[in-house]
Image (cartoon, rainbow, N blue to C red):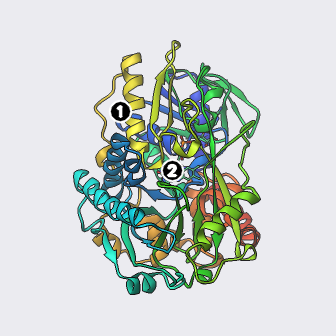
Amino acid sequence: MDTSLNAARRAHDIVELAAAHPVDVLVVGLGVTGAGVALDAASRGLTVAAIDAEDLAFGTSRWSSKLVHGGLRYLARLDVAVARQSAVERGILVTHTAPHLIRALPMVLPFSAALSRVDIGLARAAGRAGDLLRAAAGTSRDVLPKPRHLSTVEAQTLVPGLNRAGLRGGELLWDGQLCDDARLVVGLARAAAGHGARIVTRCRALDTQGNVVDELTGHRFRIRARAVINATGVWASTLASGLELRPSRGTHLILPGTVLGGLRVGLTIPVPGERSRFVFALPQLDGRVYVGLTDDPLDGPIPRVPEPDEADVRFLLGVLNSVLREPVGREQVIGCFAGLRPLLAHGQARSADMSRKHAIRTDADGVVTVVGGKLTTYRRMAEEAVDAAVRRHHLPARACRTRRLALPGAAPPAELARVPAPERLVARYGTEAPLVAALGTQVVAPGVTMGELRWGVRHEGALDVDDLLDRRTRAGLVRTDRERALPAALAAQEQESRAAGQT
Ligand SMILES: Cc1cc2nc3c(=O)[nH]c(=O)nc-3n(C[C@H](O)[C@H](O)[C@H](O)COP(=O)(O)OP(=O)(O)OC[C@H]3O[C@@H](n4cnc5c(N)ncnc54)[C@H](O)[C@@H]3O)c2cc1C
């Protein structure tokens, strides 16, 4: 079946769903978890409707660090099961699901003057443990190379801006990096649509009985479903009473690439005075560098879009500058973003110390809620959530298939290397890159072409310019980029609706 999502398909799906044909599963929420659940259920042969009150990847899933973790951080807290699960899921994502969207990122952990001998010993042991996790998960060294010690000269060569005073080399570690977290969600939703799932954005669940409202028209209708799976992240308790979440805010800064001398490797900086907390400087495809992240409990109601605060910005710059020769100033920060982790409440632990385990909960009314975890482990969470729904509602499902399912555009690295399109497009669209390029190569803002905007409307379910600028492309991360790209996004929308009207 066609994997394209667009306004026409959405309108058709709403008519079908409102006509009261029952589906096996209604998935509420289309972040990485809900999109993963929709793909899991649809690929097992179940009929699926999956809705989001806003857009694909509207919530936390677009604000992550974009790391496909091996779980080292969890190992440091002796959370061995979570660490192993993360490493296994990382291997599946990089090798089978989305090799086009993920690259191996070398990360330098500099042994700066602030680190004690014990800290250095621990960092080196962590490198070895990370490699053991990789091996235990069955991920080849061709995919993620072996960590190794760096001499002082090597560390400085890889990260030219490092402060030399007291530097004693470093450790070179490897992890997976997504080109864009929102693109993973879009890929999952399209793959689910390819298996027949009805993917409907701007459709809000009013309860867990299937009553929904089309946010574009105000039309209320009911989606009849044998099972409902609540995958609404930090909003999960609005549909599952008694579920206690302790959302925690994580902030990132965006720096122009030039500020850190065109950084090509990631930088892992221990937070002074803490054992298992780090600030990362992460080079992106467009040359910019994201610096994150904070971890602070959120007080009060959940905002629609979280805002970073000035204290987060100062904290991140402070840790970054602790290892640099030339400090980065506030005026060099060109953008910031914040996201909310959907953490499960566990006693009084600090949010930075709270487990990233996920939970699957089946309520008395049969609604399954899947929450917590992280982007890297979405597939496992989805599998367990669908298993729970299948058991509870006796659904006619085949066994889970997602360990070997590839998203649209995915291909092995050798095949991707031969795709006749610019490297940046191949990293975002895989084998579909030439089709995107055919829709227009004009650059409308840093890292955004006209073709990507038109592709977003035609095949990726973008319904307005916000979807295009904030989720299908990420122009919205930097205010000036967004302003530059806006006229092109409007034009792309208009061109595509004219083209759709003619067919
Ligand atoms: C700062 C930060 C950095 C992170 N970095 C990483 C990382 O590098 N690697 C990693 O593996 N993990 C990372 N994570 C964790 C990861 O991002 C999250 O665990 C994951 O994105 C959660 O996805 P989700 O689908 O459960 O929730 P969301 O993405 O929030 O999706 C929930 C969706 O539900 C929709 N919704 C809500 N209410 C309704 C309703 N009534 N009807 C219909 N729809 C509704 C929302 O619009 C939203 O789209 C990070 C998290 C944060 C905050």
- Name the foreground residue: 472 vs 63: 63
Asked if the beta carbon under badge 2 is closer than 8 A to the nearest atom of ligand 1, the reply is yes
**Mark in the foreground, 2 or 1:** 2
The quarter in which the C terminus is drawn is bottom right
Tell me the residue at 37%/40% (across/down). Answer: 380
Element at badge 2?
helix
Tell me the crowding category of disc 2: few under 14, some 14 to 19, or many 20 or more residues within 10 angstroms, Cα based.
many
Residue 101 appears in the rendering: no
Asked if residue 320 lies left or right of residue 166, the reply is right
The numbered dot on residue 77 is none
The numbered dot on residue 185 is 2
Tell me the residue at 66%/77% (across/down). Answer: 328
Give percent across and percent down for residue 339: 63, 50
- The residue where tag 1 is placed is 45
Instruction: Name the amino acid, label 2.
Output: Val
Q: CA distance from mark 2 to mark 1?
A: 21 Å
Tell me the crowding category of disc 1: few under 14, some 14 to 19, or many 20 or more residues within 10 angstroms, Cα based.
some
Instruction: Name the amino acid, label 1.
Output: Gly
- Identify the residue at the far front of this view: 117
